[in-house]
Image: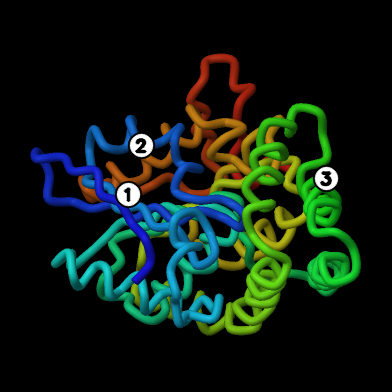
Amino acid sequence: MLYYEKLLNPNTYEWMLLIHGLGGSMKTWKYQTEKFSMDYNLLMVDLDGHGKSADKKLSSLYKPTSTVRSIRQILAYEKIDRVHIVSLSLGTLIALEFARMYPEMVESLVLGGGIVNLTISRQFILKAAEFMTKHFPAGFSYKVFAHIIMPKKHHETSRNIFIREARKLNAPMFNKWVTSIGMANRRMKRTLKTIRKKRIPTLFISGKEDYMFLNGIKDLCRRAKSFQFNILRNCGHVVSIEKSELFNRLTLRFLMRQRRYIPLPVLNTDIHSNPDGTDHIPGTAE
């Protein structure tokens, strides 16, 4: 079983499942736990090879489907029937796969720095990252990959966290997870069809400077009008760290509207949270 931790709120029966990204751990959510635990019970997992799960002998083989089954096992053990899933980067693939396999257990999805609808060029970059870790020192490869997806100076905090945590993974683990991104991408149409059919409320939150993955999400949300989408200005891939307060507000606002059954605004509605409107823009702004 994956390593996990709970943070309980005696005033609610609702659960939020937090799934981190590649090279991270449940510590990635340190900017969210205090805020989110005020309204929800939290369940945080360390993915295979990450955090305290790295010390466990697991059978998931670093594949989204088997990882989802491991998470389902945890939920069954804890007698949790339904969850809101908040995810980041690689974790968004796990979240989407969970929604495909167990849609009846998903209240809603929040996908931060989502990895969906990858173009051929983006898939090539992932293959290049896999090649580098096979033929160059892992530390060097992680640095190069981090600078590709988080290139700007103000991405430095997120980039350093990624490099630091990725070094805790060995190269074969890193490669298996990178390969799993391609596998999940090939199932994406079927996964998204299930989410729309089951009417699972879904929110994408991406940075405007997420050059690796943003275009695929923008294209998806233009075609799938039921998905909500926020683009954060002056922000790269790791939205939950680079714009943590705004990410938290948008997430909780979205979840509260599901709880109250209040319809969300359409994509072209301006929903700036700050008076000067500098922090984020609606999905159709560009």
**In the figure, 202 relative to 10: above or below?**
below
User: Which mark, by number, is residue 244?
Assistant: none
x, y percent for residue 255: 32, 46
Q: For mark 3, give the secondary structure.
A: helix
Q: For mark 2, give the secondary structure.
A: helix
Residue type for callout 1: Pro
Nearer-N-terminus badge (2/1): 2
CA–CA distance between discs 3 and 1?
A: 39 Å
x, y percent for residue 185: 64, 76
Asked whether, in this view, residue 27 is left or right of residue 179, the answer is left
**Front-most of 93 and 146?**
146
List the residue tagged with mark 3. Answer: 147
List the residue tagged with mark 1. Answer: 263
CA–CA distance between discs 2 and 3?
A: 27 Å
Q: Nearer the viewer, mark 3 or mark 1?
A: 3
Outermost residue, right direction? 135
x, y percent for residue 261: 23, 50
Nearer-N-terminus badge (3/1): 3
